[in-house]
Image (spheres, rainbow, N blue to C red):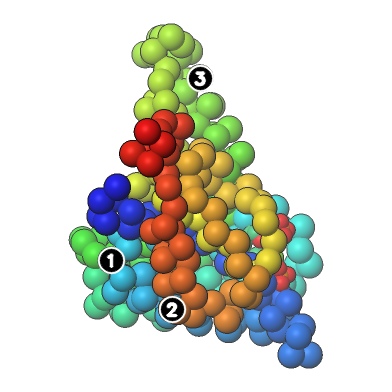
């Protein structure tokens, strides 16, 4: 396998452990979210410098609405402030931002922030940054199935013509579908409804480091680990012969 192939082009991260990070310091969970949000900037920059092409960050799941309303409201405000305050730097850093998830239920203010951020970074051709807000892998697939069913019903598509590509075309728009490296901080070894389709052949990296402590060096460690993986995709590699 060539070096180029071994480098992860699409890295996805489940940003977990903000609450515990704050609790360990005797602070409110919201403080952990605040420090965690500041860390996003560090990691986005680092990913760009390292040559990662697409970075997808899981910020809020369709299940996270189950949290106390105060925490949910704090997070929504944080997302809005983050998008607005970071916009200038994202433009300067040539980052192209996309929000993936069901944004229809978000507040008008947050949706406006999302629209502006996507619009103002649309011409950038550096790192592609997908931020998953109100994202659920199952919801994404349900929506895709509904859209495909509508096409069949309208007579534009035969059921037998549905392929993997058809499904991919109906997922949230994102420039690179397959995730090469999926990182989860915070010590849990689960996917929590993230990128169920796109991560079907990802290399999974679980670390106990809590998100606010996940530094550029930790990202490098994960990438280094990835470069040593033998990705067979169900086939054989030279080593197997
Ligand atoms: C991840 O940190 C951030 C979000 C899910 C929004 P958590 O809030 O899940 O922190 P822990 O896992 O409770 O420590
Ligand atoms: C996963 O973290 C979701 C995000 C990081 C946005 P959670 O803390 O919500 O996941 P569970 O509840 O431990 O599975
Ligand atoms: Mg958590």
Tag 2 secondary structure: helix
Looking at the rendered image, the disc whose residue lies closer to the viewer, 1 or 3, is 1
Indicate which disc residue 216 carries. 2
Identity of the residue drawn at 39% across and 13% down: 161
Q: Residues within 10 Å of mark 2 (few under 14, many from 20)?
A: some
**Marked residue nearer the N-terminal end (1 or 3):** 1
Q: Residues within 10 Å of mark 3 (few under 14, many from 20)?
A: some
Kindly indicate the quadrant of the structure image that contains residue 241. Answer: top left
Which quadrant does ligand 1 occupy? bottom right
Q: Is residue 191 left or right of residue 179?
A: right
Q: Residues within 10 Å of mark 1 (few under 14, many from 20)?
A: few
Q: Are marks 1 and 3 in contact (CB under 8 Å)?
A: no
Tag 1 secondary structure: loop
Q: Position of residue 137 (x, y in %)?
A: 58, 43
Indicate which disc residue 149 carries. 3
Identity of the residue drawn at 41% across and 36% down: 240
Q: Nearer the viewer, residue 138 or 220?
A: 220
Q: Position of residue 102 (x, y in %)?
A: 54, 48
CA separation, marks 1 and 3? 39 Å
Label 3 residue near ligand 2, CB within 8 Å: no
Q: Position of residue 91 (x, y in %)?
A: 27, 73
Q: Position of residue 112 (x, y in %)?
A: 44, 64
Tag 3 secondary structure: helix
**Marked residue nearer the N-terminal end (2 or 3):** 3
Can residue 174 be seen in this snapshot?
yes
Q: Are marks 1 and 2 in contact (CB under 8 Å)?
A: no
* Residue under numbered circle 1: 51
Can residue 130 be seen in this snapshot?
no
Identity of the residue drawn at 25% across and 51% down: 2
Q: Is residue 235 left or right of residue 183?
A: left
């Amino acid at each position: 396998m060539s070096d180029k192939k071994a480098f992860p082009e699409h890295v996805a991260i489940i940003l977990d452990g903000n609450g515990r990070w704050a609790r360990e310091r005797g602070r409110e969970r919201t403080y952990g979210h605040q420090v965690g949000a500041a860390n996003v900037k560090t990691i986005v920059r680092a990913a760009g410098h390292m040559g990662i092409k697409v970075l997808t960050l899981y910020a809020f799941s369709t299940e996270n609405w189950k949290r106390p309303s105060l925490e949910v409201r704090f997070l929504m405000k944080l997302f809005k402030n983050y998008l607005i305050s970071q916009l200038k730097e994202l433009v300067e850093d040539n980052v192209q931002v996309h929000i993936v998830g069901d944004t229809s239920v978000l507040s008008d203010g947050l949706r406006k922030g999302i629209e502006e951020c996507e619009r103002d970074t649309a011409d950038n051709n550096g790192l592609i940054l997908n931020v998953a807000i109100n994202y659920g892998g199952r919801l994404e697939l349900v929506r895709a199935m509904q859209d495909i069913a509508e096409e069949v019903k309208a007579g534009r598509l035969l059921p037998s013509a549905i392929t993997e590509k058809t499904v991919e075309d109906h997922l949230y728009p994102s420039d690179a579908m397959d995730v090469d490296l999926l990182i989860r901080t915070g010590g849990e070894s689960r996917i929590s409804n993230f990128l169920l389709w796109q991560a079907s052949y990802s290399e999974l990296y679980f670390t106990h480091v809590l998100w606010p402590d996940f530094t550029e060096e930790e990202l490098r460690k994960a990438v280094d680990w990835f470069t040593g993986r033998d990705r067979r995709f169900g086939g054989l590699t030279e080593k197997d012969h």
